[in-house]
Amino acid sequence: MRKSLCISLVLLFTCVSCSLKMTRDLSPVVSKVTSVENPYFTSDKAEYVYKMAIDAYGKSVGGVLVIKKLGLEHYRLALMTEFGSTLLDMELFDGDFTMHKVSDELNKKVILKTLKSDFNLLLKQRYKPTKVFEQDEGLLYQASSKKGFTFLRFDSFGELFEIVQSGKVKEKVFITFLETTGKEANRILIDHANRKLSIVLKKIVKSN
């Protein structure tokens, strides 16, 4: 009896510790929503300019990031120094990347792999939710991804304020949208739970 109780407690603890924090203690709600959109970076032929700071494994790299939408799920990204030198130039089309140019300081396998994954998560426009949850601050949509799940968190006003990429049992990447106005995010934070790499994007407003 005592042995069975101990086994049950171990299994319960294992189940809880391996469950995703995003959905722990939440129950799915009935929803007819079949598609959820990330509203940022969706204007056709638009060009978005941000001041970008990357902190990776104790080193910092910064510059001006230009994101240009070329079509549906099609973007060109260029990171340049304030003096105009190109640090990174790549193209994203429907989840696939083409690297046009990369500087020596960013040409590290782990850094490039992380940047590609982050930008793909940041710029992906449409998701098909498999579950919907209600939270105090709004709705949480869960969509399936290749190795886990993608969560989109909306506030009570229906604005997207966070995207989270997870594995089956643990959250990995957090993208937080701050100072949002309609379809524009003036500040974006990207953090990783399992890597010493973070990104801060601050929109550069063009003066008239």
Image: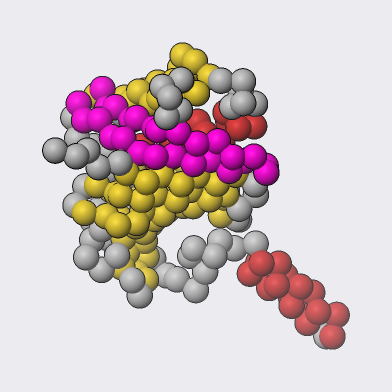
Q: Residue drawn 50% across and 23% down?
A: 87
Pick the front one: 121 or 148:
121
Residue occupying the far left of the picture:
208
User: Could one spot residue 143 in this view of the protein?
Assistant: no
Pick the front one: 199 or 63:
63
Q: Position of residue 149 (x, y in %)?
A: 48, 48
Q: Position of residue 31 (x, y in %)?
A: 27, 60
Pick the front one: 166 or 196:
196
User: Could one spot residue 171 in this view of the protein?
Assistant: yes
Q: Residue drawn 25% across and 68% down?
A: 156
In this view, 183 is above or below 124:
below
**19 sits left or right of 178 in the view:** right
Q: Range of the magenta residues? A: 45-70
Location of the N terminus (image quadrant): bottom right
Residue 120 falls within the magenta-colored stretch: no
The rendered magenta stretch, by its main secondary structure, is classed as strand
In this view, 29 is above or below 97:
below
Q: Residue drawn 53% across and 19% down?
A: 102
Location of the C terminus (image quadrant): top left
**93 sits left or right of 200 in the view:** left
